[in-house]
Image (cartoon, helix red, strand yellow):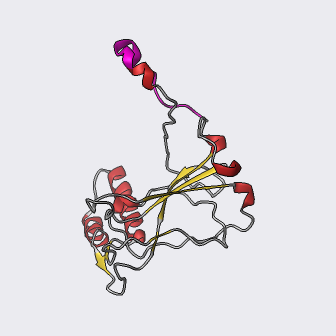
Amino acid sequence: MSRTTPPRPVNIEALFPKLGAFRGTTTRLHPRPGRPDAAASSVGGPVLWPADEPWPVCTEPHKRSSGYRIADVRRERQVLADAWARDRPTDEERDLLKELGRRHRQREIADTDPIPLVVLAQLYRRDVPGLPPGPDGCDLLQVFWCPFEAHGPTRYGLAPHVRWRRSDHVTVPLDTPPQPALVGFKSSIAEP
């Protein structure tokens, strides 16, 4: 694993000695665009999920019938990346981006319908030094969240969902995980 974090410019504990009492081990992630598979640690990549286990869903009531299509979010990102690699979007790309950035409605989705959570990250213990052991020998940490910022007392919070599992217990992995029809905000979809 390559280390890309530059050396610290100052010794913060020398400047503020009382901070030493709060020292802990932290792993900073440096995700790079790629095409990970379920056997790899990743942000936004596929997860190792048993085919016979129900996918996690959000059941908290909130608006979920208006938002962005996941395919449109990914296509918009690709068009923008290609455009900025050349300097700027063409007129045709601007028109396409306007269409891709449009919110959609699906009136048949009720505010109480369960919606599939989206993958945020999957981390194997072998890849993350200092990751605490999971329960019962679990070696895989999976993090999901609801793609709508509509949780908690303010109704603007995220709803993360953490799952520990033993990777060697997944004998038949799920090929295609369920996805929500719409997401409330584009940045809820992590790029692999």
Vertical order, 131 against 179 (above or below): above
Residue situated in front as seen by the camera: 161 or 35: 161
The foreground one among 40 and 32 is: 40
Circle count:
0
| Residue 162 % position (x, y) | 52, 56
Residue extending farthest to the bottom is: 108
Instruction: Give coordinates of residue 95: x percent, y percent.
Output: 25, 70
**Left or right of 119, for residue 54:** right
Position of residue 12 relative to residue 46, above or below, is above
Q: Is residue 120 magenta?
A: no
Q: Where residue 97 sits in the image (x, y, percent)?
A: 29, 66
Specify the quadrant of the image occupied by residue 6: top left
Give the vertical position of 82 relative to 3 (above or below).
Answer: below
User: Which quarter of the rendered picture does the N terminus lie within?
Assistant: top right
Quarter where residue 91 is shown: bottom left
117 left or right of 99? right
Residue 5 falls inside the magenta stretch: yes
> Looking at the image, can residue 125 be seen?
yes
Judged by its main secondary structure, the magenta piece is loop
Say which quarter of the image contains residue 180: bottom left
Q: Position of residue 16 (x, y in %)?
A: 35, 16
* Residue ID at (72%, 68%): 172
Residue situated furthest top in the rendering: 14
The answer to whether any part of residue 11 appears in the image is no
Highlighted range, magenta: 2-18
Q: Is residue 8 above or below residue 94?
A: above
Point 33% across, 56% down: residue:
83
